[in-house]
Amino acid sequence: MFQFMTSTRIVFGEGALHDSLSLFNQFGYSVLLVTGQDQHRSLPLEHYFKQQNMRYQRLVIKGEPLIAMMEELAAMGRTFGPDMVIGIGGGSVLDVAKSLAALIPNQGSVYDYVDVVGRNVPLQVKSLPFIAIPTTAGTGAEVSKSAVLQSAQEQVKVNLSNVELFPDLAIIDPTLTYGMDMVLSGYCGMDAFTHLMEAYVCGEPNPLTDMICEEGLRRIAVSILPACKEDHYSSRSDMAFAAMLGGMARSNAKLGAAHGLASALSGRLNAPHGLITARLSPYVMSENITVATELGRSDVLARYRKLAVILTMNNDANIEDSVQWVDSMLTKLQLPLLSDYGLCNTMFEDVAEDALRTNAIKGNPLPLNQQRLVTILEQVCSCYCNS
């Protein structure tokens, strides 16, 4: 038995934003609009609000969403009293908007509802209607039930997760990703890859997420380089579709140690979440393959071999080819090293201990103890030092 949940309505395709503006009216006439610093992409929405005499307030998000910031924004949102929340931007923007839709009608502290450092209790009141419009192809937040927030005090990233957080409407218009620079596109694309990869090899997959992951991984294997390096439009569309599938997969299967470690590291390194997961992925994959071999877990090894076949498009691919494919993509996309952000000065024991408390690591295909996680971090640093 399994269940599957995602956003209530999804509109996908070039020009989807322009064609979907009238859908906002079904949710009311008062809008809390959450955007990034680039106002250009949100202009069509603001023009539409003015034409429809809709009341709106715009919040501009800079950087990672901190819990303390969310407390202030939620209080501001309650004062404004919106009928709906619309987020248009990258993953951080959508996470803020999604969180506000949940927090504004609910009383108490953000810490009441987050994992790791909080109480992780269910929301008491239904979220406000939420519309998600991604401008990057990475997190899949437009179809997921969680938002990633940062606790500055504990130096760790945490999840606000609840079925109420699924967007009521996701508008995915690949044209909004046109023109992104290669590095930003690269770590967003590899973030989508890590969602799909970890959901595919996780300890609790299901037939529907398997199908979703395989399709998403196939599209990434073909399209990530032309999308990121050449701004190839149909490849951009493939990456937007794959990111959406990654969001669906991670909401209905599980993740793994790459995301568990990334949650613990993100509060300590001023590096993008997608870059951290991407740089950790090959080492986590390699460690999982080693442990599966030691334990004779042929089921896990079969998953990694199928992953290698999908990524290399070679039916004779070996298990290790999946790891080599990731290493190759990281090099070709010229993504920064985590050592550039101070990884090797981090206390690995503390990071591993924090990672073990995350929800993400519970989905790893095999249990990895603290020492195994420390070994992964040491391998990352050893590679950088020897490169």
Image (tube, rainbow, N blue to C red):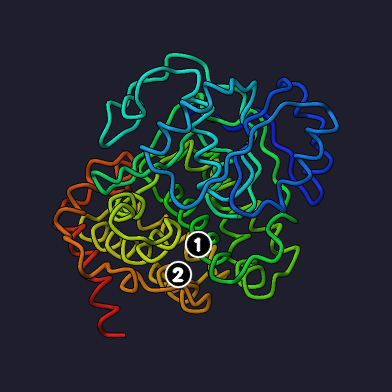
Q: Nearer the viewer, residue 145 or 53?
A: 53
| Residue 326, disc | 2
Q: Pinpoint residue 343: horizontal percent, then vertical percent.
A: 27, 67
Res 1 visible: no
Q: Nearer the viewer, residue 124 or 333?
A: 124
Res 329 visible: yes
Give me the residue at 56% from left, 53% from top. Answer: 214
Q: Is residue 263 left or right of residue 19?
A: left
Q: Is residue 218 above or below residue 314?
A: above
Q: Pinpoint residue 279: horizontal percent, then vertical percent.
A: 38, 66
Q: Pinpoint residue 20: horizontal percent, then vertical percent.
A: 80, 37
Mark 2 falls on what kind of element?
Answer: helix
Q: Is residue 92 above or below residue 375?
A: above
Sequence-wise, the earlier of marks 2 and 1 is 1
| Residue 190, disc | 1
Give me the residue at 74% from left, 44% from top. Answer: 12
Q: Pinpoint residue 150: horizontal percent, then vertical percent.
A: 36, 44
Quarter holding residue 86 = top right
Q: Amino acid at mark 2?
A: Val
Answer whether labels 2 and 1 touch (C-beta < 8 Å): yes
Give me the residue at 21% from left, 47% from top. Answer: 354
> What's the CA distance linking mark 2 and mark 1?
9 Å
Quadrant of the frame with the C terminus: bottom left
Q: Is residue 314 above or below residue 66?
A: below
Q: Is residue 141 left or right of residue 23?
A: left
